[in-house]
Amino acid sequence: MILFKNIEVWLLLILCLILSACGYRFLGSGNLPGDVEKVHVGILKNSTSETGAENMFTNAIRYEFIRQNKNADKEAADGFLSGEIKSLSYKTITHKRRHTSAERRVTAKVALELKDREGNILWYKVVSAREAYDVMDDKLSTEQNRKRAISELSERLAENAYYRLTDNF
């Protein structure tokens, strides 16, 4: 077996291939823009008719920064994240009967911007997320499903926003 006589050559070749890989990395493993280390997340502005959405989305985003150990109070932060919930829209995605919904989808769009201590905008994006929920015959159950869907999509949107914020491509 001539292929295996020079095992050192093969190992060296494999090592070179590994070191010259194209640079894939885990989502969110990059740095925040502008040498920002810690971020203060302000309460989002709510431009929708959904009461309390600003608290739900703000808390989800804060939790994501806490989870990533990047959250700070206003005095200790070197970056400030603010934003606005631009829209919450609803669309029927399946029907029980001709004019009766079986399932709806809620979509949220949130504009976020990161500023440094001097007020310079370091990053701005509109991020979105969507979640489906069941429509029940009981309006109270449908409302609970809708609120749960908004809560779940706020968490997914917060995670997506953090990953996009730390994407250094």
Image (tube, rainbow, N blue to C red):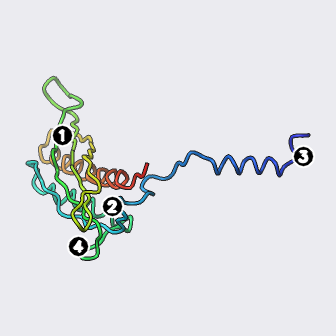
Towards the viewer: 57 or 73:
73
Q: Earlier in the sequence, mark 2 or mark 3?
A: 3
Picture disc at residue 64: 2
Nearest to the eye among marks 2 and 1: give it: 2
Nearest to the eye among marks 2 and 3: give it: 3
The residue sitting at 24% across, 47% down in the picture is: 149
* Structural distance between the alpha carbons of marks 2 and 1: 32 Å
The residue sitting at 15% across, 38% down in the picture is: 137
Q: Amino acid at mark 2?
A: Glu
* Structural distance between the alpha carbons of marks 1 and 3: 70 Å
Q: Are marks 2 and 4 in contact (CB under 8 Å)?
A: no
Q: Amino acid at mark 4?
A: Lys
* Structural distance between the alpha carbons of marks 4 and 1: 44 Å
Q: Tell me: residue 97, above or below residue 155.
A: above
Q: Are marks 4 and 3 in contact (CB under 8 Å)?
A: no
Q: Tell me: residue 115, above or below residue 72.
A: above
Q: Position of residue 11 (x, y in %)?
A: 77, 50
Question: In this rendering, would 167 be left or right of 131?
Answer: right
Mark 4 burial class by Cα count in 10 Å: few <14, some 14-19, many 20+? some
